[in-house]
Amino acid sequence: MKAIDTLPTGKFVFRLRFTVDGKRVLATVPEANEVLVYDSATRRVLARMPVEGTPVSTAITPDDHNAYVVAMHTWWRPELGASSKSTWKR
């Protein structure tokens, strides 16, 4: 297997998760307590979302509108609607 490209994360990424439609990638960054959302075509960061606690995993709903972030001692849910500006709900 050969790498064809990389994502500029700057720090250690624990997990990557693609949205169902493949248009975005969520990357958990435990050292920064954040989740990065990338455009998978351009590989540019669409959003940096701070997480209360240490993010370790994500799960995305089948309609691509919500993602659940598993973090140490907390649960967060970002709204991943059509806009590139995502918001967190607790």
Image (cartoon, rainbow, N blue to C red):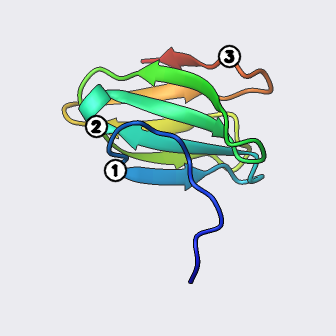
Name the residue: 51% across, 22% down: 48
Name the element at disc 3.
Answer: loop
Spot occupied by residue 2 in the image (x, y as percentages of width and height): 58, 78
Name the residue: 76% across, 41% down: 42
Q: Label 1 belongs to which residue?
A: 14
Spot occupied by residue 90 in the image (x, y as percentages of width and height): 42, 18
**How packed is label 1: few (under 14 Cα within 10 Å), some, or many (20 or more)?**
few
Name the element at disc 2.
Answer: helix
Residue 47's image quarter?
Answer: top right
Contact? badges 1 and 3 (CB < 8 Å): no
Q: Label 3 belongs to which residue?
A: 85
Contact? badges 1 and 2 (CB < 8 Å): yes
Sequence-wise, the earlier of marks 3 and 2 is 2
The mark found on residue 30 in the picture is 2
Q: CA distance from mark 3 to mark 2?
A: 21 Å
Q: Amino acid at mark 2?
A: Pro
Q: Can you say whether 56 is above or below 88 in the image? A: below
